[in-house]
Image (cartoon, rainbow, N blue to C red):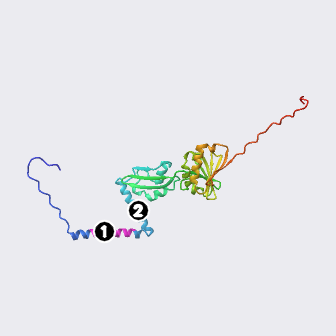
Amino acid sequence: MKQSGGRGKAPPAPPRRRRLPRHVRHALLWSLLVIVVISGYGGVIASRTAVGQALLAQSFDQFVAATAAFGLVVTDIEVEGRETTDAATVVAALTAARGTPILSVSPTRAKEQLEKLPWVRSATIERRLPGTLFVRLIERRPLAVWQHGGLQQLIDREGAVIPVEDLSRFARLPIVVGDDAAANAGMLIDTLANEPELAARVTAAVRVGGRRWNLRIDDVIDVLLPEENAEAAWSRLAQLERASTLLKRDVQTVDLRLPDRLVLRVNAAPVRETTPARKAHSSGKPA
């Protein structure tokens, strides 16, 4: 209310509201608390019977419909961390389109549905009232192609299989071979990443005896890594390659299993055919 000008007579003070006595206020507060507890207990009891569950579900649906009438509906869906998963697939997993009552969206159920998608490792869903659903995804990152038992499967860093049927777009990823190769691939990739130039030439890695790796470089040369100190052996090979282009020679196998030496096996040199010399005649005349 705006004040008028001049020094006119001051308006009378509004009458003071009478406060209820303290004992009355305490009684009302305790009564309200008892009603809430009894209602909650009644809901628990009712949920144990089929009829009670149906009544609770009906009451909840009516409550959600009432909140929608007051504007608590989905108006926006924000997704963070999505790189590979299709946006329409995320919305379908949420089972929530624009206009859906936001309180009808179960974050727990939506999380379960999203984490069933091939590329989603974990998901978090928040209802940000009045109308925003916020989704945070952590997607799987393809690490290698796992070859075992006649199958080829895409795996992530943890060795979990990413259920993708078409592997053609992952042709540049290394192939790891062996029953336990997937579980140990992450550590191997970390070792190779210490020498990125040489790592880019690795086309396959074979797990040997559950203890060590054999690498295939340029799809031609086999490199036998040791069971222990594989990182040091890999760095030593990279240094030799930078200094003398060792792997660009006619090498078949590089054995790094011995810590104090490097054993090379080279391809056998092709046998050259020689033309037999003519025998000279004593007469000096051609035969």
Marks 2/1: CA distance?
A: 25 Å
Residue 24 in view in this figure: yes
Q: Is residue 38 magenta?
A: yes
- Give the residue at mark 1: 33
Residue 6: x %, y % from top left: 9, 47
Q: Amino acid at mark 1?
A: Leu
| Relative to 102, 212 lies left or right | right
Image quarter of residue 183: bottom right
Q: Which residues are magenta?
A: 29-43
Q: Residue at x 43, y 53 (%)?
A: 135
Residue for point 41% across, 55% down: 126
Q: Is residue 29 above or below residue 134?
A: below
Q: Circle 2 is placed at which residue position?
A: 58
Circle 1 packing at 10 Å, graded few (<14), some (14-19), many (20+), is few
Task: Based on the picture, tell me whether residue 181 belongs to the magenta stretch.
Answer: no
- The outermost residue toward the front is 282
Q: Say which element carries label 2.
A: helix
- Report the side of 201 relative to 44 (left or right): right
Q: Position of residue 91 (x, y in %)?
A: 46, 51
Amino acid marked by disc 2: Gln
Q: Is residue 219 left or right of residue 11?
A: right
- In percent of width and height, residue 158 lies at 53, 56
Of the two numbered discs 2 and 1 on the same chain, state the one appearing first in sequence: 1
Residue at left offset 55%, top offset 55%: 187
Crowding around mark 2 (Cα neighbors within 10 Å: few <14, some 14 to 19, many 20+) is: few
Task: Please tell me whether the stretch drawn in magenta is mainly helix, strand or loop.
Answer: helix
Q: Quadrant of the C terminus?
A: top right
What is the x, y in percent for residue 87?
47, 48
Is 13 in front, or is 84? 84
Q: Nearer the viewer, residue 238 or 207?
A: 238
